[in-house]
Amino acid sequence: MKVLVIENEAKALNDISFCINVLYPDGEVISLAEGLKALKTLEADSPQLIIAASSLPDLPSQDLVKRIRKLSDAPLVVITEGEDVGDKARLLEEGADECVRKPISPIEFLSVVRALVRRTSGLGYKQEQAISLGNGVSVNIGTREVFAHDVRVNLTPHECTLLFELVRNRGRVVTSQFLLERAWGTEYVQERDFLKKYVYRLRCKLEADPSKPKMILSERGIGYKIATVACLGFATFSGLVANAPATLRVFTQVSQFIAAVS
């Protein structure tokens, strides 16, 4: 686990580093005290978790979160100080996944990071399994990758969680409460307008016409569902390729039989 920590306060940095070492003894921690330097690091590196302070001297917290999200979809925890509920909501709107207030409680911080990584990690699919959503869109939940016409689509962790939950429950309507709880936690289960914004963002990235979605469909008053999903097992395809001569022989025999009885 590679973790980028953006924090200019020594005590907070020590507390965060201690917690990360407890969770991931073999992990790598990259610590920086300035937001702009951290953004340059993100352009060249790909951490799997980002911890960022909201009180950096060179960059306002909302700008930092917004710019991080343009470069990375890694889980992002913001360490706040005196922010009120409105400030926290704006940080979450810009792309933060969780907010933890100073002074940092190791127990709370560890619980938040564990839950966040669990929510945003793969959902039990094998890495070689690709899932086609139609219209040139495919996802690989094992590697947390989404492609549209063979071009990778950058999704935030929240967007990934929502999409992967819909894919995992393909063929069924997933309630708004369930999606909100999976992506943000139980305290957000009534925030349907919040969910609508994120679903619209997904549609803008994946649908040909977000105003007339054909992939991510709404069920009024209930939730959302994926319209059509076809699983493409690469292992099965590889097996066919490996046994191409035998496959061709069987195909030829069947063709000859059909010709004989016609």
Image (cartoon, rainbow, N blue to C red):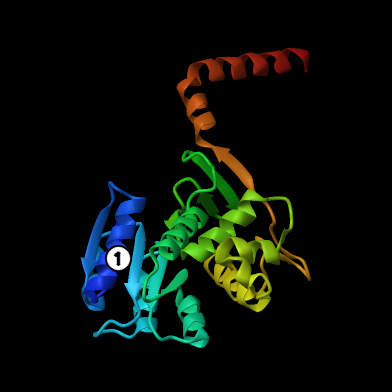
Report the residue at 46% width, 59% height from top.
111
The reply, left or right, for residue 161 in relation to residue 174 is: left
Callout 1: helix, strand or loop? helix
Residue 257 higher or lower than 63, as above or below: above
Report the residue at 38% width, 63% height from top.
106
Residue 193 higher or lower than 218, as above or below: below
The reply, left or right, for residue 249 in relation to residue 256 is: left
Q: How many marks?
A: 1
Q: In x, y percent, where is residue 197? A: 59, 76
Q: Nearer the viewer, residue 16 or 159?
A: 16
Q: Nearer the viewer, residue 219 or 165?
A: 165
Q: In x, y percent, where is residue 123? A: 54, 48
- Residue 39 visible: no
- Among the 4 quarters of the image, the one containing residue 30: bottom left
Report the residue at 62% width, 66% height from top.
186
Q: Residues within 10 Å of mark 1 (few under 14, many from 20)?
A: some
Q: In x, y percent, where is residue 178? A: 67, 61
- Residue 262 visible: yes
Residue 211 higher or lower than 1, as above or below: below
Q: In x, y percent, where is residue 222? A: 77, 66
- Among the 4 quarters of the image, the one containing residue 37: bottom left
Residue type highlighted by circle 1: Asp
- Among the 4 quarters of the image, the one containing residue 95: bottom left
Report the residue at 56% width, 40% height from top.
232
Residue bearing mark 1: 15
The reply, left or right, for residue 197 in relation to residue 150 is: right
Q: Where's the C terminus, which quadrant?
A: top right
